[in-house]
Structures are given as structure tokens and as C-alpha cells.
Amino acid sequence: MCLAIPMRIRAIEGLVATCEAGGIERDVNLFMVQGEDLTVGDHVLIHVGYAIKKISETEARLSWEAFEEVLRHDA
């Protein structure tokens, strides 16, 4: 099973974006989403350091709600 994390783009420089989720920032590679029209504020799914898909803010929020639900039941 693979896990992709939704993050918001904070800055873009070439094929590298600084993304943020839950107060954590990471630099991610945009190579796999070169065809997407990405701008600061967009949300992307991140898998092993690569953005793999642009998603809506609603999709990102719903993903984080699902992660939080799983963590609540795991404790």
C-alpha cells in the first residue's frame, strides 16, 4: 500500500516546490506534475518526495480528516 500526503504549495522554484502541511514544510519535486498549472496555494499529493497529483482544497481537507480519524482510533 502506498501513502500520499496532501500538502499546500508555499513557493515554487523551477521543478521544486516548498510545501506545507500541519506546520511541517518540505521541498518536493514537481517533475511528475509538469503538465499541471500549479501556483502558490494549490494542493498536491506528495509521495516519497514527489508531487504526483494536483488536488482541490476540499480533497486535501477530506484526506486530512480521514488521517485524523484513523489516528484517533489507533490510540
Image: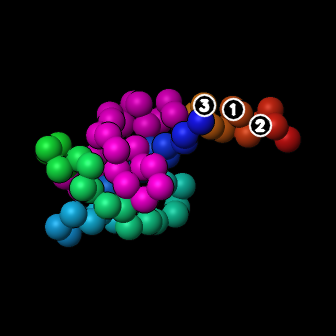
32 sits to left or right of 64: left
Task: Say which residue appears at 69% left-offset and 32% top-offset.
Answer: 69
- In the picture, the disc for residue 69 is 1
Identified at 43% across, 37% down, the residue is: 60
Q: Where residue 53 appears, x then y in whole percent?
A: 32, 40
Classify 10 Å Cα crowding around label 2: few (below 14), some (14-19), many (20 and above).
Answer: few
Residue 10 visible in the displayed image: no
Picture disc at residue 51: none
Mark 2 highlights which residue?
Answer: 72
Image point 14% across, 44% down: which residue? 35
Q: Is residue 1 left or right of residue 21?
A: right
Residue 60 can be seen, yes or no: yes
Disc 3 from disc 2: Cα separation: 10 Å
Q: Which segment is the magenta one?
A: 39-64
Mark 1 Cα shell of 10 Å, populated few (<14), some (14-19), many (≥20): few
47 inside magenta stretch: yes
Please tell me whether mark 2 sits on a helix, a strand or a loop.
Answer: helix
The mark that comes first in sequence, 3 or 2, is 3
Q: In which quarter of the image is residue 66?
A: top right
Residue 22: where, in percent of width, then height? 54, 55
Q: Which of 41 and 1 is in front in this view?
A: 1
Q: Is residue 69 left or right of residue 44?
A: right
Residue flagged by tag 3: what amino acid is it?
Ala
Secondary structure beneath dot 1 equals: helix
Q: Is mark 3 on a helix, strand or loop?
A: helix
* Label drawn at residue 66: 3
Q: What distance separates the C-alpha of mark 3 from that of mark 1?
A: 5 Å
Which amino acid type corresponds to the residue marked 1 in the rendered image?
Glu
* Whether label 3 touches label 1, CB < 8 Å: yes
Q: Are marks 1 and 2 in contact (CB under 8 Å)?
A: yes
CB atoms of marks 3 and 2 within 8 Å: no
Q: Quadrant of the N terminus?
A: top right
